[in-house]
Amino acid sequence: MTKLKHVFEMTTVVIIGLVTGAFLGGFPLTLGLTGAILGGISGAIILFLLSLFFKFRKLARANTIVKYASIGILPGMLIGGSKILGLGATGALILGAISSVIYATVIYKLLNRHEKSERYVSFKGHYIVLFLLGSISVFITILILDFLGNILDFEALILKLPYILTMSLVGFLALCVYLLSLIGKKRKLKTWFDAFKANHLFLASLGGTLILILTITLFTRQGYIPLNTIIFIAAGIVIPYAIGLILPLSLGYLLARNTNRPVMGAVFSIIGSIFVMVIGISVAPMLLLPGSGLMWAGLITGLFMLMFALSVLVKPESHFFAGCAIIVMSILSFLGAAGGLIIGGLLGLVGGVLIASWAGLETTVDHDPNTGQSKGSTDISITPSDTVSS
């Protein structure tokens, strides 16, 4: 088993080096097909030898840091070389290097800390999922933002709003964000005054951001700043990078929460139900036409999928029944809603299977030897899934 694990880790490293090196040689270095082949082979060999060296010297931490650094190169190059930023090969190289450093320092330390506190789980294939899913989601997000940039005009929309109204909306949004942060601090501290003191840095940064936004808006109205350019450059960096992190990392965070409740399956099912309901709503104008009875399936099955996915979070002991029901509803969604563009139906099927097959966590009750009474447990009590309540 240990040898198989080492082989899988080395294969992961080779794939990451191959894909990253091929992109580096083909695009930023502009060497074409030959550069892509040579870059892919070179990247795979370099990462393989580095990983082998660190394993031989038993430098596990250095080996992990190198893996995270290699994972972050491709998402950064995709963002830096996109048409949104317009920096070409230079931007790809710069953003790739910056992203590599961020992954090797910030992301690595964050996940390491959360894993020790049992808020994150490093699953099998963690590195390859983080690399492939992160890079693909960054690429797709860049394409969507580029498309939106050609059809939306944020500057014209903002200029139509009175400046006082714009200030009020931005200020209200900032206040809501600060209150949510303050409530989160209060849950860890005793008094609101302590929470306010602990949150003063966040308040200062939020106030500075608010002033910056309002200043940019004012200069835009005076014609000094092209707001569309600023928005799409900022969005072209922040949004793809955030999605490229959130999507792959969400699996580890969901697995950490999946012990007491089938959270992962519920999340997949909820997202699938949203796709199904969106398609069901889009065909709503045709529901009154003759022969449109199956059109109702999109709304009905989507609502049932959502209901069962939410109910299993409240009553996890009913996971088997709820999971089977979600599987049935996902299959029926293909009749009236094209399975929510197929994506919703597939997500529902995966979520239903994860919910139905969820193992749960049995409560271990300790008894006081003096009184014979139970001391309690931090885990929730799970009813066996073959009971009548399921």
Image: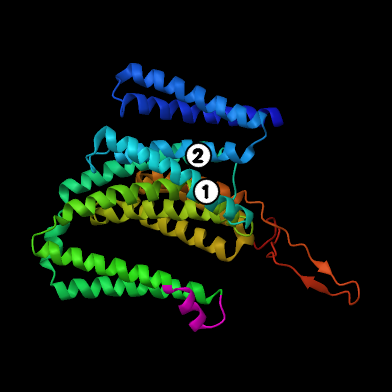
Q: Position of residue 213 (x, y in %)?
A: 24, 65
In the foreground, 30 or 333:
30
Specify whether residue 193 is painted magenta: yes
Q: Tell me the quarter of the picture where residue 113 sits.
A: bottom right
Instruction: In the rendered view, tell whether residue 304 sits above or below residue 330.
Output: below
Instruction: In the rendered view, tell whether residue 11 sits above or below residue 86.
Output: above
**Which residues fall within the magenta stretch?**
189-200
Residue plotted at (29% across, 75% down): 172
Judging by the rendered image, the residue that carries numbered circle 2 is: 129
Residue plotted at (40% across, 18% down): 38
Callout 1: few (<14), some (14-19), or many (20+) C-alpha neighbours within 10 Å? some
Q: Is residue 328 visible?
A: no
**Mark 1 vs 2, N-terminal side:** 2
Specify whether residue 121 is painted magenta: no
Amino acid type, label 2: Val
CB atoms at circles 1 and 2 under 8 Å apart? yes
Image quadrant containing the N terminus: top right
Amino acid type, label 1: Leu
Judging by the rendered image, the residue that carries numbered circle 1 is: 251
Residue plotted at (30% across, 56% down): 281
In the displayed structure, does residue 390 sit left or right of residue 163? right
In the displayed structure, does residue 214 sit left or right of residue 336? left
- Main SS of the magenta part reads helix
Q: Tell me the quarter of the picture where residue 134 sits.
A: top left
In the foreground, 5 or 68:
68
Q: Position of residue 262 (x, y in %)?
A: 58, 55
Disc 2 on helix, strand or loop?
helix
Q: Hey, which residue is sitting farthest right in the picture?
A: 370
Instruction: In the rendered view, tell whether residue 215 sits above or below residue 70.
Output: below
* Disc 1 from disc 2: Cα separation: 9 Å
In the foreground, 295 or 31:
31
